Amino acid sequence: MASKLFSKYGRVFDLLPEIILVLDSKQNLIDLNRSAILSLGYDPEGPHPEHLEQLIPAEDWKTFSPKLLQQKDHEAFEAHLKRSDGSLIDVSVEIKELASGDKRFQVVIARDITEIKKRELEYLQFSNVIHYTINPIQITDAKGIMVYVNPAFEKASGYRKEELIGRNPRLLSSGKHSRDFWKNVWEQILSGKIWVGEIENRRKDGTAFHAELVISPIEDGNGNVVGFLGAHRDITEQKILQQQLIRSQKMESIGTLAAGIAHEVGNPLTSISSLVQVIQRTTTDDFTREKLELIKNQITRIAKIIRDLVDFSRPSTHVVKLTDLNHVLKEALSIVQYGKKVKDIVFHVELSESLPKLQIVPDQLSQVFINILINAVDAIDGKPGEISIRSGASNGRVQVSIRDSGKGIAPEDCEKIFEPFYTTKEVGRGSGLGLWVSYGIVKSFDGDIEVESLKGRGSTFHITLPINGE
């Protein structure tokens, strides 16, 4: 039958790479080409399967059988063919009708797609790893335009993928890295090398996002760079800890310096104070006595400033003890009042005399009050203004309110001021850590800190702490 069927062309179909099976009306195999014999693992000289059902797994026969009965050409569909050893290969199948005289045959043309399916599976597994990893991942084309970002990248950047795809990554630039920096990066990755380094980006809300970035070139089969994969590791918290360590070391240095100044300045001040008192006792001139008293008061003030600076600069004792909160407030205020910006500020202090003592770390709470008071002074910005400090207790908690008449805080900023490195001050005038540190300290005492503010109408910070460590 086969010789008659293909007599016009001989065995040309043996030269075709596809698997070709010729069936009669009962799905008997009346011919198959050389590619089919070899692909299915049969001996070219040995016995071959006689019926199509021998080559089709049972689960696939349900798909095959109805198509064969319809007696018409079918569009390609995927299935499996069973080899002589029982293993399966993935194939893309087309069924064609063939007429020879008054007889009709069906030709099954199958293309082996096992390797393609394997690559698709590998790609699916790879894409799942990329998609669900906790590290932010972005893929760009060869020109640096983003073509893919994973959910972790959306979360880290604050942008939705629709806002990122088709854009250049410079959308996230903090402006902290020079043209030469990025030029060197591009030179390295375009040459097919991997680049590893640290960068600082900006989230959609403007906050800093520090990351350790690995950029890997994506090459085609010919070794041409067709894109780049950027894998980020968030090191923002690490940077914050580094900043805290630097600040802690700086404060330690200031404390050491202050102790030295206190020693070097304290002795001369004591001598001057003694001489003033001697002269006061020996002179009878009222004018001289008045001026000497003024000198004595200023010496006392200088000595107190140095003493307070030394006390504030000392490392925290971390010792929880019963503490008079009003006393801590007064000490914090006395330190802030030394600043030159406060000369036109009026302070209103209303502290409850019946305030119970609290189980806290005094020097840490002092840092909270100093941070908030300094911010209040900065908000007034050297203009005449007022700062009110009140304390009270109710419902088992102590409340402290610090209100200023400064420029206030915009609503969108109020939600972020307790985040690290977030500041509304000009560059160089604030680290964005003060309120974040204060928030952490208050929370460590099971307390709370909130802000009320209107743009142009001042701000009020409310600090609440539990009584007796409740």
Image (tube, rainbow, N blue to C red):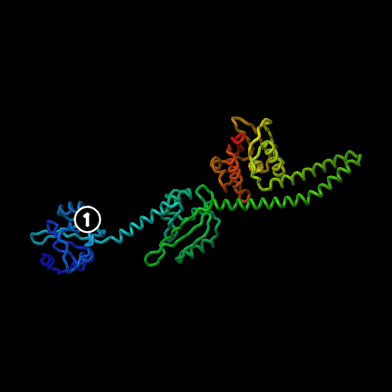
Q: Which class describes the residues within 10 Å of circle 1: few (<14), some (14-19), or many (20+)? A: some
- Report the quarter where the C terminus lies: top right
* Residue 180 sits in quarter: bottom right
Q: Is residue 244 left or right of residue 156?
A: right
Image height of 345 relative to 427, above or below: above
The residue most toward the left is: 102
Three-letter code, disc 1: Pro
Tag 1, which secondary structure? loop
The structure residue drawn at horizontal position 80% and vertical position 44%, both measured from the top left corner, is 299
Q: Is residue 130 left or right of residue 291?
A: left
How many numbered circles does the render carry? 1
The structure residue drawn at horizontal position 53% and vertical position 57%, both measured from the top left corner, is 199
Counting from the top left corner in percent of width and height, residue 41 is at 22, 65
* Res. 315 visible in picture: yes
Q: Residue under circle 1? A: 57
Q: Nearer the viewer, residue 175 or 22?
A: 22
Image height of 321 relative to 59, above or below: above
- Report the quarter where the N terminus lies: bottom left
The structure residue drawn at horizontal position 91% and vertical position 39%, both measured from the top left corner, is 284
Counting from the top left corner in percent of width and height, residue 377 is at 66, 42
Q: Nearer the viewer, residue 92 or 162?
A: 92
